[in-house]
Amino acid sequence: MNLQLSHFQAMLLFALAISVAFGFLSRRPTLERVKYIVWSLFLFLLIGIGIGWAMYPLSR
Amino acid sequence: MTEETQVTPAPQHDAKRETRAVAIGLAGWILPGLGHALQKMWGRAAACFLTVAALVVIGAGMRGNLFTSDGGDAFASLGYLADLGAGSFYLLARSLETHGPDVSHADGDYGTRFLAVAGVLNLLAALHAYEAARGRKA
């Protein structure tokens, strides 16, 4: 088995899995869970991409 | 005016409940989601099982490093503890990694993190199931 993912795909899958798990463990009503999952996923991606851009000048 | 009464459970009842909670926590560690399934928390059970399984399958697919007990340093030992957190899925990851780990490029390095996070997440879920069985969390 050999899975080849881009950096973004890996980050997206990671963020999705963690957000879903945390959403189900920490919230009970379905609507609250969905809100938490969407918000958490958004923040994961925003912060991940933000850190990526912040490090961009250092890569040169 | 209402009268408040406090009912303190008998110590024997407490011990029984604690034993059951520990068994549920262990079950949740061995098979992700089982701790919640035993308490009929089906949504949480499915979420734990599927997310830990997804992280393990992706991590092993990316040829992440699955640590063993004979790691040379503290980091390898910590990695082994994190990987072991996935319970029986540690063995699943081992069986999926037929060609062994490859951390010579980013994919393998990410895979290592996926596997470690699967273990830590499962430990968190098992602890949650234990606490729920003790009546501390809904």
Image: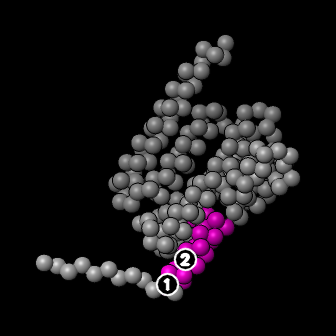
Asked whether, in this view, residue B64 is left or right of residue B100, the answer is left
Q: Is residue B129 visible?
A: yes
Question: Label 1: which residue?
Answer: B11
Q: Position of residue B129 (x, y in %)?
A: 53, 67
In whole angstroms, how far apart are the C-alphas of marks 2 and 1? 10 Å
Asked whether, in this view, residue B123 is left or right of residue A42, the answer is right
Task: Name the chief secondary structure element in magenta.
Answer: helix
As drawn, B63 above or below A26: above
Neighbour class for label 2 at 10 Å: few (<14), some, many (≥20)?
Answer: some
Question: Label 2: which residue?
Answer: B18
Q: Are marks 2 and 1 on the same chain?
A: yes
The boundaries of the magenta stretch are B13-33
For the residue pair B124 and A28, the one nearer the viewer reads as B124
Going 59% across and 37% down the picture, which residue do you hit? A11
- Is A28 a magenta residue? no
Scheme of image coloration: one colour
Q: Residue furthest toward the left?
A: B1
Q: Earlier in the sequence, mark 2 or mark 1?
A: 1
